[in-house]
Amino acid sequence: MSCSGQGLIGLDQALAAYSTVESRAVQTLPLVEAHQHYLAQDVLSEIALPLFTQSAVDGYALKSEDILAGITVFELVGEIRAGIEEYVQIESGQCVRIFTGGKLPDSADTVARQEIVSKLDSRISLNQALNKGTDIRYQGEELSIGTILAKQGQYLKSGLVASLSMAGVKEVSVFNHPRIAVLITGDEVSKSLDNSAQVFDANSPMVLTWLKERGFYSIHLEHVIDDETVLKKALANALDHYDLVITTGGVSVGDYDLIRPVSLALGANEIFWQVAQKPGKPIYFAEYKKPNQSSYLLGLPGNPAAVFVCLEIHVFTLLKAMQGLKEAKPEWEKASLSEAVKGDSREQLLRMKLNVDEQGQLSVSKLKKQQSHMLSNLSEANVIGRIPVFNNAENCPKFIEFIRL
């Protein structure tokens, strides 16, 4: 699927190309260490939850048959705390003090919460009638042995980690994180502005923090000048030692756009170059075959807004595919377009604001300052809207797709 510079491919075609990549190896990790990984297989419960029948409240455990018999005063014969195994049994007319999570005695079948009870020395008085089973959590009512707790391909966020931990899961099989190198190119990009022709570097902090937000913390970052010899050395090292190489700048058609020709000279196989999207048209994707497993090069444009859009749509899709999600694609939603926008010969990926009205209807509005060198509207943007190709104003769509930021 190579365009070989002879034309643009569509955005959907580009995204589909990522499904062809090789998945990273599977490893088994302790549950907490597996945070921010994708599951490589389903996780089944080996236990029932709750583990035992227990009280749902602080109160008193008693027999429902006593309540049906009209007994309202009960002799208090013991106490059961959560986490403390007690062997207290009750007879007719008796009760036992029990706390939330405490294991219910076999001889009890109902709990009277303390708010409906009056304490009378070593007795209690029940102030209202109760049904059998009131305020009890039964063993296995949440899940039984063999229940699917999480499915292959699910992302391990903190909530899912907690859910698995509660079910006694100690370790899980996950796809390895790809090792990532980031090469920031461009003589004009600087941290300190060594001369008046340079601009502050937004790309390296953007790419690094974006990756960290998704669980990638050990990243090789390198700034590379626009010199073919220097770039060749840096790119060869990155392709040899990392699973994914992300570059910014140097993928267009200028005299110093060297990423594509240098990578091809190193033996990379072009998958696509140039996508019919705005911003981000010159994006470049290639495979570099190695003896054990291929590495991949995703060359992003240099303008920071184009980098941001490509991170959210292209890099995220590619990273998912490298971690076993072969059918990965952006999670597009639909909303009405609050006002008409100008059409273009390429799909537009606009930084927009999502609004929700009182009826819960979604609409998106275009923010100002959409040029690819501008980032100031990211303080307001909460979605990227996808505007299809259209020419005449009357063809402006009423509804569009978007992804949340």
Image: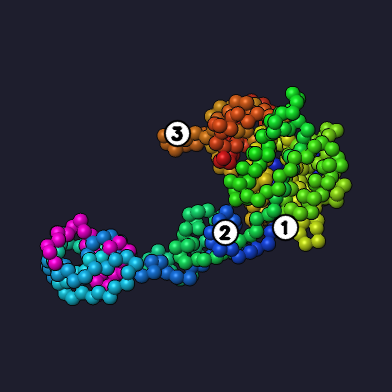
Give the amino acid at mark 1. Answer: Glu
Which numbered dot is residue 156? none
Looking at the rendered structure, the secondary structure element under dot 2 is helix
Position of residue 322 measured from the top left corner of the image (x, y, whole percent): 68, 54
- Answer few, some or many: residues within 10 Å of disc 3's Cα (few below 14, many 20 plus, some between 14 and 19): few
Q: Residue 234 vs residue 133: left or right?
A: right
Instruction: Report if residue 401 lies within the magenta region.
Output: no
Residue hosting label 3: 357
Residue 341 visible here? no
Residue hosting label 1: 22
Give the amino acid at mark 3. Answer: Asp
In the image shown, does 52 or 359 lie closer to the viewer?
A: 52
Residue hosting label 2: 34
Question: Mark 3–mark 1 contact, CB under 8 Å?
Answer: no
Earlier-in-chain disc, 3 versus 2? 2
Give the amino acid at mark 2. Answer: Ala
**Residue name at image x 75 percent, y 40 percent:** 223
Question: Mark 3–mark 2 contact, CB under 8 Å?
Answer: no
**What's drawn in magenta, residue-wise?**
99-122
Earlier-in-chain disc, 3 versus 1? 1
